[in-house]
Image: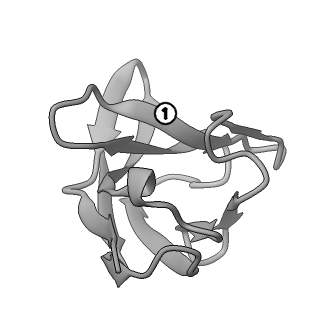
Amino acid sequence: QVQLVESGGGLVQPGGSHELSCAATIELNFWFLTMDWYRQAPGKQRELVASIRSSGATNYADSVKGRFTISRDNTEKMLYLQMNNLKPEDTAVYYCHTVRNGVNFWGQGTQVTVSS
């Protein structure tokens, strides 16, 4: 079983920076899981924002490449998303996600609103 809890959402001005965190509760090793950040804007489908593998290899959606950075702390079982140069179109609920034994696990989501 995996439990994921996001934190760090809020209101950010365009061009600003913000960091999201996700705390994972898992009885086995966290390090081997591929971890993801997804987001869902109002009226839109949930989309993959960034992924990080156990090797540390990362992937990003084209819309955030060069602006967002995903990272992890395997000792603390934490996942992070550093967001820079935020745009209004980044406004969404952001979700932490992983898959274990073919089962999808999601956090409850945290709202990020980019507005002046």
Q: Which residue lies furthest to the front in this view?
A: 116
Percent x, y of residue 26: 40, 57
* Quarter location, residue 106: top left
Q: Which residue lies furthest to the top in this view?
A: 102
The residue to which callout 1 is attached is 48
Identify the residue at image location x=30%, y=68%. 113
Relative height, residue 45 to residue 79 (above, below): above
Relative height, residue 93 to residue 14 (above, below): above
> Tag 1's secondary structure?
strand
Q: Which residue type carries mark 1?
A: Leu
Identify the residue at image location x=79%, y=53%. 66
Question: Does any portion of residue 12 appear in the rendered image?
Answer: yes
Percent x, y of residue 74: 67, 66
Which image quadrant: the C terminus?
bottom left
Nearer-the-camera pick, 46 or 115: 115
Within-10-Å neighbours for mark 1: few <14, some 14–19, many 20+: some
Q: In this view, does 60 lie to the left or right of 108?
A: right
Question: Does any portion of residue 33 appear in the rendered image?
Answer: no
Which image quadrant: the N terminus?
top left
* Quarter location, residue 45: top left
Nearer-the-camera pick, 48 or 15: 15
Nearer-the-camera pick, 50 or 87: 87
Percent x, y of residue 115: 33, 73
Percent x, y of residue 81: 57, 65
Colour scheme employed for the rendering of this structure: one colour
Identify the residue at image location x=66%, y=53%. 31
Nearer-the-camera pick, 76 or 110: 110
Identify the residue at image location x=43%, y=23%. 101
